[in-house]
Amino acid sequence: MDGRPDEPGPNGWANPCTTVPVGGRNMGNVQSSRAEVRAELTAPGQTYELQPVELERGAVRWFVNLPQTLRELYEQNATGKDFLVFGDEQLTFAEAYDRIARIAVVLQQQGVQHGDRVAISMRNYPEWMLSFAAATCLGAVGVGMNSLWQTDEMEYALRDAAPRVLLADAERLAQFRSLPDMDITAIPVRCEHEPDELRARIEALGPVPMPECSVGPDDPAVILYTSGSTGHPKGVLSSHRGVLATLYAWELDAVETVVRQASAGPAPAPAAEPTYPPTALLAIPLFHVMGLHGGFLSSWRAQRRVVCMTKWDVALAAELIERERITSFSAPPAMTGDLVREAQRSNRDLSSLLTVGGGGAARAPEQVRQIDATFRRAAPSIGWGMTETNAAGTLISGAEYLQHPAAAGFRLSVIDLRVVDGDDQPLPDGERGELQVRGAPMFLEYWNRPDAMADSFAADGWFRTGDVAYLEGDLLHIVDRLKDLIIRGGENIGCGHVEAALLAHPHVIEAAVYSVPDARLGEEVGATVHGTPELDLDELWEFLAQHLARHEVPRYIFTSEQPLARTATGKVLKRELRAEGVARVQEASGPAV
């Protein structure tokens, strides 16, 4: 066995940085009050007025009085307020918008037109956000490339999305240049050993107006890749409306919370505390829905300052929180757990934090309590969402979350939830079944995958999440997964994808991949393989490192001298193999795995 540490990122459970802590109330009263306040805030003539809009899969609730496209969102919020901090670099929203317009012109010069794809493959640099915004202002589709991918995974996504332009940093540019027959224009970004072409071109342009372009709410805006249970990752194509529905639903939830707290009566006067401008620490990758939507886009809408990290380092994160007076941090449980431990062992002043949000995976109830106990002012929060729902789904925070630390949260305003049996028939509250969803935030399609689309929707248009769940009114509890997935620190890892890489090795005959519990990351990747006498595990790990992203490489690989046990129909008995693997890990490392 060997350890393969990596940087977790969110996918699945979701939480924006905008969540407002919720005061403690009786659960029945909270749900009643929630519905009443929401109805008032979304009534005709209100800012958050919701009206039905007919889309391809039926009518959805939609915010009719708010910006209808990302382009409008950027334009209406290009203010002189501070926006981005990256090392010694700082930009206001207006300065960032100026750069977005220049990058849009650069993309036009490369022939990018409405509907074309623009791929972005780099660490969390400012150029990631600015390039994405520029592409969507042109009516093009921003393609978020996983910066942890190996070369063959990058090749698959590039051939799948077929972008006209790729913007890449040094490491990703080197991967791209090793690929054959790629008819894609690459623009280097922040490359140490060659000119920064993007910077040079936008500096040469000087200030320019945003290019004219007609963009509609249902035009495609983004492709993000998500791992499925088998095969290659799927490109999830979403519209401007889908993305914006999530941003506005998060915003409305925060307003609802403030109104409900005010209606509950005056709270005890708090002790005098310093106040700081809303500032988010962006430490999760922008190629994830929570990095892009929760970190960048919701901050643009909320006029919230963003401090950007390119790689997770908990000591640096604590330093940035102290120095920049960061007020909100949202990340997978592995990262928020790191921050709890850093706060407990260091003398950093983290008192500016008001929210420690969760995303990417379920958080252990004990960590919920630790967040509340460790940070003087910060409330814990979490939510559930998917790439396919643009991260929208549920939210829960503060006292409600402490009361229900295993819950996934309360349903957002533009999402419908139901739990069904094997025949897609709705089940009553409290009964477990598959969670299905529908609403304005839903994605348009799996790019180039009509087969996956056919399998993913019930006959009446509800999306099959693959999660086993139950409902208590609008409060969602997720208890298991139907799909053969591992969620490692918020990263979805398809078991079939890892198995395919194992089977590509010449000395591996059979392979079964499964999850192994892990105290920090939630789950780790385990595998049992049957191979030839020549199979060497160290050589196998080296091989896998060339074919899988770092987080996908199994931390634990066990060998079987005999062929893997199978059922009478030929299916590998993966449950038994997993039980054996988990027992071996626990025997080697103790019960706290």
Image: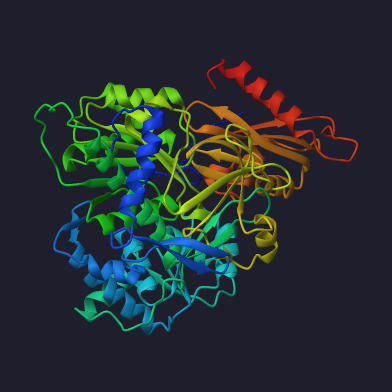
- Residue 150 in which image quadrant: bottom right
The residue under the point 16% across, 26% down is 268
- The image shows residue 259, relative to residue 49, as above or below, that is above
- The image shows residue 257, relative to residue 438, as above or below, that is above
The residue under the point 47% across, 58% down is 441
- Residue 421 in which image quadrant: top right
Q: Is residue 50 visible?
A: yes
- How many marks are shown on the rendered structure? 0
Q: Where's residue 418, x and y in %?
A: 58, 45
Q: Where's residue 433, x and y in %?
A: 65, 38
Location of the N terminus by quadrant is top right
Q: Where's residue 484, x and y in %?
A: 67, 42
- The image shows residue 52, relative to residue 150, as above or below, that is below
- The image shows residue 82, relative to residue 561, as above or below, that is below
Q: Where's residue 296, x and y in %?
A: 32, 56
Location of the C terminus by quadrant is top right
Determine whether, in the image, residue 423 is placed left or right of residue 386.
right
The colouring scheme, among rainbow, by chain, secondary structure or one colour, is: rainbow
Of the pair 60 and 451, the residue shown nearer to us = 60
The residue under the point 69% across, 57% down is 455
Determine whether, in the image, residue 154 is placed left or right of residue 167.
right
Q: Is residue 281 visible?
A: no
- Residue 591 in which image quadrant: top right
In the rendered image, the residue lying farthest to the right is 568
Of the pair 474 and 78, the residue shown nearer to us = 474
